[in-house]
Every structure is written in C-alpha cells, then in structure tokens.
Image (spheres, helix red, strand yellow):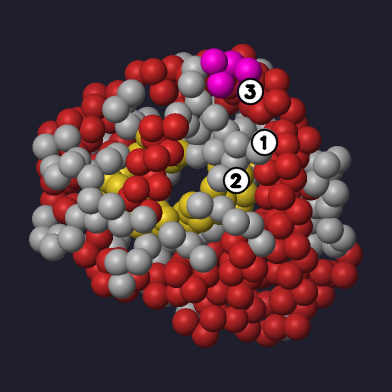
C-alpha cells in the first residue's frame, strides 16, 4: 500500500468527505493465484511468484486499493499451524488445517505458541522481510498486521460445531480457549509490528462472530476483540466478517473497530444506522453472484444500487461484501471501478 492509499483510508475512517467514493478489495489466495495464472502451491511456496502476483494486481488496477497489501498468508492454516494443526496442501484448492483437539474438554492440552518460532508464522515474517526491498521500491509499505480472529482460530482448532456448542455448554473452558488465543494474537500482532515499524493498522478476520447471538456476542466477542485492538495504538482497526454482521455492528465502536467489511446481505444504510455512522464500511455488493458470476454491466449496476438512498456518503469505501472471491475477471473489476468513479 502506498502513502496516498493509506491517507485515503485514514480520511475515510476519520469521516472526511472525499470528491469521489474510494474503492478497495481484500485480495488473497482464493482469487489472486488463479487470476494471475499461478498454481496454489507456487503461490504459497515461491516468494517470487507471490510477489509478482501481488505486483501485477497493483499495477493492473492502479485506481483501487488492495487490502491489506502484499498479504503474506497461507490461507486458514497460518495461525492454527502454530498450535500444531496438521496442514493439507493442494495445487488447485485452498489449504486446510485439521483439528488439534476433539472437544472443549481437551483445552488444557493447548499451550500458547511462540510467535517467533512456531508453525508457519516465521515463514510469514521471512517472506515479508525478503520482499520488503522490492515492495518499497514500488513506493509501497507494509501497513497492516494481519491475523484471523480468536473465534475463527478456535473453530479450526476444535471444529465449528463443537466450538459453538461449547459456548453454550462449557463457558469456563470456552473462555479459557478464547483467552489463550487472544493472548497469542496480541503476541503475534505485536511481533509483526516489531518486525515492520511501518505498520499502522491491525486487520482481523473472523466469520464465526457472525453466527452467535447477542448474548454470546457480548460475552465472547466484544471483550476479546477490545483487548486485542486495545493492545496497540493503531490508526486503523479493521475487521472482516462476511457472515451476518448485524449482531456485532452495534458493538463495533466499543470493540475498537473503525473499518468494517461485512456481509453483502446488509445494506450500507442499515450498517450506518446500526453503527451510528461512527465506523467506516467497506462494501457491499455480492462477491460470488455478482462480482464473480455477473456481467460487467451487472457489476456496475450493483455498485450504483449499493449507494442508492444513502443520505451520507462519508465513511464508505465501495467493495465486495467479503473478500475477492475466485474467478473474478479483470473486466468485472474494471466495471466496478468505472461505476464507482461516477459516484461522489
């Protein structure tokens, strides 16, 4: 991410009215390797392939922002691997992390990982260190520390159904698990900031928070996310949750979030009302049915429809309601950017 793009994000988060509504997209392994013609294994294992894929996207679509920018990731395996998860790798699909414990009764078997040595975490750091000179030669910097959220990681360590059941049946052990992961995430984000002082933002991704009720949101989501974001003096605290976001939306400001990427199922106006327009919204057209499978005309129409009826265009960045999905064409991305350029 270059300085002008970072400044644009700051302006939006701070409520500044810009001449044009900016656009931005979360890009990672579901879309980027396929779009640039690379195999998944090459993308994950070859620094040059990974760098060139990101560079090509940035240079092809210079009128938009890609988040978090040069994301060194290994799909959903990054954080679970540090807890000892067995990771399965495929050349034509995303990697998968297997369970580490069978149910919440085994939580005492888990220990907090060492973020400097464990799992795939050192490979994330080393990839960024090796490519940092090339990134900076393009006029870009590493601006975000990135991690999956605590409920998301918990669901991989023991299974989604098992974890969500434990929220209702064994609160003490469930809090112990989420608390352990939260402390680990503070270490992990802090280590990223230590390694790359240019980082000024924290980006968490957690879809599981979209499946809980209001009571569980207040018990398992708000305090732990508040603790993570509150541990750092970041200028942008970004949260991705493309499951239902209506439960967490009223609590986002209390959690410390100031930039939110929600599900496309919620209108921008609805989210503005629930957040009191105090949190910038990144969205919000359907990623799969429109962005990936629609025609360029359908994409353009969806972009214009997404802001129809908005009485306040501040704190809005146009995007998908979720990350960039597989098989999105260059034509559809250009159609999105072109449609957004007519709005202001």
Q: Earlier in the sequence, mark 2 or mark 3?
A: 3
The local crowd at label 2, few if under 14, some if 14 to 19, many if 20 or more residues have their Cα within 10 Å, is many
For the residues bearing labels 2 and 3, Cβ distance under 8 angstroms: no
- Residue 295 visible, this orientation: no
The residue mark sitting in front, 1 or 2, is: 1
Highlighted range, magenta: 132-137
Per the image, is 62 magenta?
A: no
The residue mark sitting in front, 2 or 3, is: 3
Q: Which residue is mark 1?
A: 196
Which dot marks residue 281?
none
Per the image, is 133 magenta?
A: yes
Q: In the rendered view, does 31 fall on the left or right side of 22?
A: right
Q: Position of residue 148 (x, y in %)?
A: 61, 52
Q: Tell me the SS state at disc 3.
A: helix
Against 5, residue 262 (above or below) is below
Secondary structure that dominates the magenta span: helix
Q: CA distance from mark 3 to mark 1?
A: 9 Å
For the residues bearing labels 3 and 1, Cβ distance under 8 angstroms: yes
Q: Position of residue 127 (x, y in %)?
A: 69, 26
Residue at x 49% of width, y 52% of height:
236
Against 302, residue 229 (above or below) is below
The local crowd at label 3, few if under 14, some if 14 to 19, many if 20 or more residues have their Cα within 10 Å, is some
Q: CA distance from mark 1 to mark 2?
A: 12 Å
Where is residue 276, by image quadrant? bottom left
Q: CA distance from mark 2 to mark 3?
A: 16 Å
Q: In the rendered view, does 314 fall on the left or right side of 136?
A: left
- Residue 194 visible, this orientation: yes
Q: Earlier in the sequence, mark 1 or mark 2?
A: 2
Q: Which residue is mark 3?
A: 132
Which dot marks residue 146?
2
Where is residue 137, by image quadrant? top right
Residue at x 72% of width, y 76% of height:
174
């Amino acid at each position: 991410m270059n300085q002008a793009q970072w400044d644009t994000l700051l302006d939006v988060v701070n409520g500044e009215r810009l001449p044009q509504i900016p656009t931005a997209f979360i890009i990672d392994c579901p879309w980027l390797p396929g779009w640039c013609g690379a195999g998944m294994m090459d993308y994950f294992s070859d620094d040059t392939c990974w760098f060139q894929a990101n560079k090509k996207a940035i240079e092809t679509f210079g009128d938009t922002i890609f988040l978090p920018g040069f994301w060194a990731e290994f799909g959903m395996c990054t954080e679970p691997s540090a807890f000892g998860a067995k990771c399965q790798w495929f050349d034509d699909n995303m990697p998968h992390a297997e369970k580490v414990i069978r149910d919440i009764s085994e939580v005492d078997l888990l220990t907090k990982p060492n973020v400097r040595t464990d799992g795939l975490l050192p490979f994330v750091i080393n990839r960024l260190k090796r490519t940092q000179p090339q990134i900076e030669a393009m006029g870009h910097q590493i601006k975000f520390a990135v991690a999956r959220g605590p409920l998301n990681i918990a669901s991989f360590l023991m299974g989604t159904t098992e974890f969500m059941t434990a929220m209702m049946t064994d609160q003490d052990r469930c809090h112990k698990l989420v608390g352990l992961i939260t402390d680990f995430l503070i270490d992990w984000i802090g280590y990223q900031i230590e390694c790359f002082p240019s980082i000024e933002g924290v980006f968490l991704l957690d879809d599981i928070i979209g499946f809980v009720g209001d009571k569980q949101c207040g018990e398992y989501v708000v305090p732990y996310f508040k603790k993570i974001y509150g541990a750092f003096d970041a200028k942008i605290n970004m949260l991705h949750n493309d499951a239902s976001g209506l439960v967490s939306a009223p609590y986002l400001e209390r959690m410390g979030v100031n930039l939110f990427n929600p599900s496309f199922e919620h209108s921008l106006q609805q989210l503005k009302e629930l957040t009191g327009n105090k949190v910038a919204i990144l969205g919000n057209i359907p990623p799969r049915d429109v962005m990936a499978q629609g025609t360029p005309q359908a994409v353009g129409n969806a972009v214009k429809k997404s802001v129809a009826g908005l009485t306040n265009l501040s704190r809005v960045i146009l995007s998908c309601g979720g990350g960039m999905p597989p098989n999105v064409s260059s034509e559809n991305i250009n159609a999105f950017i072109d449609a957004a350029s007519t709005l202001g």
